[in-house]
Every structure is written in structure tokens, then in C-alpha cells.
Image (spheres, rainbow, N blue to C red):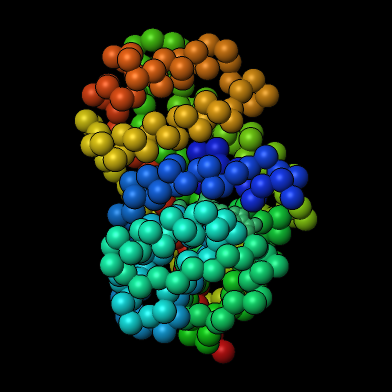
């Protein structure tokens, strides 16, 4: 997720010296993608006058949005692009299951971007913040657009909320403390990225600096009400498992909060996330659009 997101890290294994294994996150990414997917449909509604010949989903992960793009633009050649061959294999299975036409391409960002064919629509959700020089990455994406082409970047938005403030045990306000710990981890992740460059994260301005026009941002609310259906509930579990795995005392999470997470994740505990009736899911996704003119 984004800077306010769920503790995602970065990278593709150990060659870049990071601690992150995207392929191991396939289930989380697919579940989360499905749970959030109404926003992708709403964002694509904004582009209903577009008739793209080629579409790229940069950093597609397991292909939830890429398959939606293929469904929305059946005449277009849609390519899911990611650094993880395992995630692209998931995207292929998903496309076959849904009966949509999807190509895949394994590419490392930012260097591999220059080798891609130009496109009329580029979608890239929660990916640019995993590149050291975000402005340069946006410039690279803008250059990949054909004249008149649209870049849609998903960054920012609001962190997900799914827990009541008072769980009935532990110290109230766990969700806010998880967000704070995630922000600490996110900042360290950004600082340690190869070629990390600090920039004012004003996404519309960054799109304009990348040479794009008609820049606008739209935010979409994602809401799943309590009691949660099976899919969103599994997605909440996957997010909390990830947070339990990556967050700890260095990020400011207390031993008491870690104990509460363990209880929430215990399948046998009636107050755990598998069984409690008061879980909900509320988040907001912001999509920044820009057009290449000339
Ligand atoms: C947070 S996930 C987002 C997945 C999907 N776009 C979504 O919105 O659910 C980031 C994706 O970018 C890919 N990625 C991150 N850094 C990358 C890099 N430097 N080169 C290639 N792919 C990268 C990861 O493999 C992962 O699939």
C-alpha cells in the first residue's frame, strides 16, 4: 500500500539487499486487490471515452486490476508488468479463469521500463513509492505514453480501518498505533531504497512535472460493512498477519499490542478476526490522472 498503507515493503529478493519477498505476498495482494476492486471499476468509469489500443498495468502484482482493465477494454492489448514472475503467473491463471485476454511481462523498475512498447493507458497502483526516485519513475511512465495517452497513478488515499476502537480487550486505539508503526517502517523502506530521492509527495504536481496535462485526482471510498463477508474478512486477516510479521518494537509497537494481535489472529479465539461480528472495512483510494499532450 501507500505511505499510509499496510506495511508492504519493496523489492524482489536479496539482490537489492532488501528484506522483501513479493511472491510470498501473493495471497495478500490478490485478496486485498479483490476487496478494494470496486474502486478500480469506478476509476475506469472516469475513462469511459478512452479507446486505448495498448494498456499497461505497471506493478500489476497478481493481476486483479489488470484483469479488470482487460474486461473494460476488450479491444485493447493489455499487459500486466511486474518484477515478480510468480505474481505474473498468478495474473495469468486469474485471466484464464475470468476469460479475459492478458499478456504478462517481467520487468524491473525503473530500468526495465524504457524497453516497453508505448501505450495509450498506463495504470500503476501503489508501485511508484517502491522506486527510489519517484519523480524520475513518473517521468519514465509519462514517456511511455502515446500522445493523448493517460497515466493513472494510485498513491495516497487513506489507510484502511477495520477494527473497533475498543476491542473489548487490550488498550483501545490499536488501529491508529498500527498505522503509526507502519508509517515508521514505510519511511525506513523509502530511505533505504536504492537511489532514494526525497520529494514533496504532491502527486498532482509530480505528474505535471513529468510533463502531463489535465491532471486531476479522484478519491473513491471502499466500504464493506459488518458483519464482513468471507473475502474481505480473509483480507483483514492477511493484512494483520503481515503487520504481526513485520511490525515490532523498532517501529514502536508494544509487547502488549503484539499480544493483542496474537489474540486477534487466533482462529480458536471468539474475539479473533475470524469470528467477531464487528469487523468492517473502510478505506479510500486516490487515483491521479494525467494526459500526455504532444
Ligand atoms: C504494493 S504491490 C501493488 C500491486 C497492485 N498494483 C495493487 O494495487 O494491488 C507492488 C507491486 O509492485 C511490484 N514491484 C515493486 N517494486 C518493483 C520494482 N522495483 N520492479 C518491478 N516490480 C516492482 C511488486 O512485485 C508488487 O507486485
Q: Which of 50 and 58 is in front in this view?
A: 58
Q: Residue placed at 28% from the left, 62% from the top?
A: 98
Can you tell which quarter of the image residue 228 is in? Answer: top left
Is 241 placed left or right of 114 in the picture? left
Is 67 placed left or right of 16 in the picture? left
Residue 186 vertical position relative to residue 180 in the rendered view, above or below: below
The residue furthest right is 195
Q: Nearer the viewer, residue 271 or 115?
A: 115
How many numbered markers are drawn? 0
Q: Which of 118 and 49 is in front in this view?
A: 118
Q: Where is residue 283 in the image (x, y as percent from the top left)?
A: 38, 43
Q: Where is residue 240 in the image (x, y as percent from the top left)?
A: 45, 30
Q: Where is residue 67 in the image (x, y as percent from the top left)?
A: 36, 64
Q: Residue placed at 59% from the left, 77% from the top?
A: 116
Q: Ligand 1 is found in which quarter of the picture?
A: bottom right
Q: Residue placed at 61% from the left, 65% from the top?
A: 107
Q: Where is residue 11 in the image (x, y as percent from the top left)?
A: 65, 50
Residue 7 vertical position relative to residue 77 in the rendered view, above or below: above
Is 271 placed left or right of 52 in the picture? left
Q: In which quarter of the image is the C terminus?
A: bottom right
Amino acid at each position: 500500500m501507500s505511505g499510509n498503507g499496510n506495511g508492504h515493503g519493496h523489492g524482489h529478493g536479496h539482490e537489492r539487499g532488501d528484506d522483501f519477498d513479493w511472491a510470498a505476498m501473493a495471497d495478500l495482494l490478490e485478496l486485498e486487490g479483490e476487496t478494494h476492486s470496486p474502486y478500480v471499476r469506478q476509476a475506469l468509469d472516469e475513462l469511459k471515452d478512452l479507446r486505448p489500443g495498448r494498456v499497461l498495468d505497471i506493478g500489476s502484482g497478481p493481476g486483479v486490476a489488470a484483469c479488470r482493465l482487460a474486461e473494460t477494454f476488450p479491444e485493447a492489448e493489455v499487459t500486466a508488468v511486474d518484477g515478480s514472475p510468480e505474481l505474473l503467473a498468478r495474473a495469468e491463471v486469474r485471466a484464464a479463469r475470468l476469460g479475459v485476454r492478458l499478456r504478462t511481462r517481467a520487468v524491473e523498475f525503473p530500468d526495465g521500463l524504457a524497453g516497453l512498447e508505448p501505450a495509450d493507458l498506463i495504470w500503476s497502483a501503489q508501485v511508484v513509492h517502491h522506486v527510489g526516485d519517484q519523480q524520475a519513475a513518473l517521468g519514465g511512465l509519462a514517456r511511455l505514453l502515446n500522445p493523448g495517452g493517460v497515466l493513472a497513478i494510485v498513491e495516497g488515499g487513506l489507510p484502511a480501518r477495520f477494527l473497533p476502537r475498543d476491542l473489548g480487550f487490550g488498550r483501545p486505539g490499536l488501529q491508529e498505533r498500527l498505522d503509526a508503526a507502519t508509517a515508521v517502517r514505510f519511511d525506513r523502506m523509502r530511505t533505504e531504497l536504492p537511489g532514494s530521492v526525497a520529494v514533496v509527495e504532491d502527486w498532482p504536481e509530480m505528474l505535471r512535472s513529468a510533463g502531463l496535462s489535465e491532471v486531476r485526482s479522484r478519491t473513491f471510498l471502499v466500504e464493506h460493512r459488518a458483519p464482513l463477508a468471507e473475502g474481505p474478512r480473509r483480507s483483514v486477516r492477511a493484512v494483520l498477519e503481515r503487520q504481526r510479521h513485520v511490525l515490532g518494537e523498532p517501529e514502536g509497537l508494544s509487547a502488549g499490542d503484539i499480544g493483542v494481535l496474537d489474540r486477534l489472529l487466533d482462529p480458536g479465539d471468539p474475539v479473533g478476526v475470524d469470528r467477531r461480528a464487528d469487523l468492517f472495512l473502510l478505506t479510500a483510494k486516490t487515483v491521479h490522472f494525467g494526459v500526455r499532450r504532444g
